Amino acid sequence: MGLSGLQIYKLLPKTNCKECGFPTCLAFAMKLAAQQVELSACPYVSEEAKQQLAAASQPPIRLITLGAGDKKIEVGNETVLFRHEKTFYHPPALIVRLKDTLPLEECKAQVAQIGSYAVERVGLTFGVNAIAMENASGDAATFAQRVEVANSSGLPLVLMSKNPAALEAALAKVGNAKPMIYAADANNWQAMAGLARRYGTSLAVHSDNDLGALTELTEKVKGAGAEDIVLDPGARDLHSSLISLTQLRRLALKKQFRPLGYPVIAFPGEVAKTVEEEAILAAQHIAKYGGFIVLDHFDPAVIYPLLTLRLNIYTDPQKPIQVSPGLYEINSPKPSSPLLVTTNFSLTYFTVAGEVEGSGVPAWLLIADAEGLSVLTSWAAGKFDAEKIAKSVKQFNVESKINHRKLVIPGLVAVLSGDLEEELPGWEIRVGPREAIDLPAYLKNVWT
Ligand code: SF4
């Protein structure tokens, strides 16, 4: 159990200097007890107090790193049950499982396909995070060979086998890539913990729907020197996995129960009868509370919506994804091309820019700084008004780029047109469509 706020307070300097960002040491202590701040925010804690506070300042869910290099993934270290309390920081890894029974050439082809899959959304590029290779053949040499193929993708790996000898053969080839070993159970935990310790990898522990046995197992492998643990509670269907994963998250956060303070690995494909069912289960695990989600099908039609869902849940709502304000050129505009304005909310920008680009009409797109909010929200908050738009026109030197004085504003803020004509004397303010999807028709039919 961690320390209470008052216990922590007794160990702080009690000077109320405010350097941590809180008005008093007591306020800081309360936040530290709730695992919502880092102890390092106070520069005046003594070494002795730091040691005593170590338990309180440890994250309730250990951060696990899978892989090495620029594609490594970090999972865990979450501090809240619900995103509205704070935010979620480390998105679950989406992993695709292959079996080592795949013919070599087919294995190579699938690995290449998975490794090269990339999609762009709101200016960010996403893909599959890792490949899991299962030792379905039971043969150590075949397993090691297929693992090497998977490693050629550059993605982190999960090595799945019950046989420590097969795992060792694979680790001898790819141990430097810091894969995860799956999984230690009641029978093989000593050998598995030994491998994890020797190769410095993370280790998943598996128990069949028994959190007591899972607790016992984590304590055993930790005692044997495996620090980076991942939990597989064995629950697979929608109902039992929701209960199990929620229990684990609550035990870690609310009870600060260290033996289960690790991320969870989930296998939505194991009970799903169709790819759609697998997608639904995976979506549930993204929302609550999967850390590593192993899919049995690589289908872009499923992966893309899962990536989008994950992005939605793991985007900090207090810090919207933004693009830089400025004047953007679309389809090589000329001075006579239309000029449109919108806000710097990423989704808004990419939606509007995508429609204009798709229309084939050359245009200028002025992006005003609305603190990353969408059109209506920023207008309602007073962050996208006539003054702000006029300021952007001047700031980005728009008049030097175009030979007309016509500005198209979003239809949702038609109400701004009067004020804008006052802020921009000599300009004609035109009201564009309410929805970005109607922009191509507007540009082709109305503007011209
Ligand atoms: Fe207290 Fe440290 Fe915060 Fe200063 S920085 S108010 S000493 S907790």
Image (cartoon, rainbow, N blue to C red):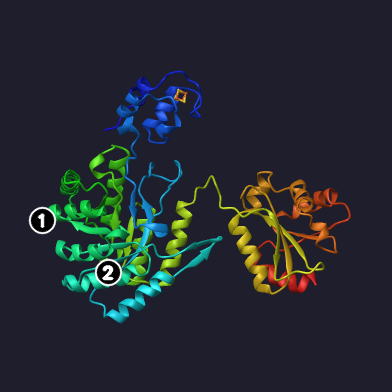
How packed is label 1: few (under 14 Cα within 10 Å), some, or many (20 or more)?
few
Q: Say if residue 425 shows up in the picture.
A: yes
Does 23 sit left or right of 229 as displayed?
A: right
Residue 424 horizontal/vertical position (percent): 84, 51
Task: Give the residue at the far right of this rendering.
Answer: 426
Mark 2 crowd level (few <14, some 14–19, many ≥20, 10 Å Cα): many
The quarter in which the C terminus is drawn is bottom right
Q: Secondary structure at mark 1?
A: loop
Q: Amino acid at mark 1?
A: Asn
Left or right of 6, for residue 388: right
Q: Is residue 42 above or below residue 406?
A: above
Q: CA distance from mark 1 to mark 2?
A: 24 Å
Q: In terms of image quadrants, where is residue 123?
A: bottom right
The three-letter amino acid code for the residue at tag 2 is Val
Tell me the tag on residue 27. none
Q: How many marks?
A: 2
Tell me residue 245's x, y (percent).
Answer: 29, 51
Which residue occupies 65% across, 65% down? 353
What residue do we see at 38% from left, 41% from top? 79
Label 1 residue near ligand 1, CB within 8 Å = no
Q: x and y percent of residue 196 in the render?
A: 22, 54
Q: Which label belongs to residue 187? A: 1
Task: Name the residue rendered at 27%, 69% in the picture.
Answer: 147
In the structure shown, which secondary structural element does the residue marked by tag 2 occupy? Answer: helix
Looking at the picture, how far across and down is residue 357, in whole percent? 66, 70
Provide the residue designation for mark 2.
147
On screen, 19 above or below 355?
A: above
Disc 1 or 2, which lies upstream in sequence?
Answer: 2
Which residue is at 56% across, 50% downward? 320
Mark in the foreground, 1 or 2: 2
Q: Which residue is most to the top?
A: 15
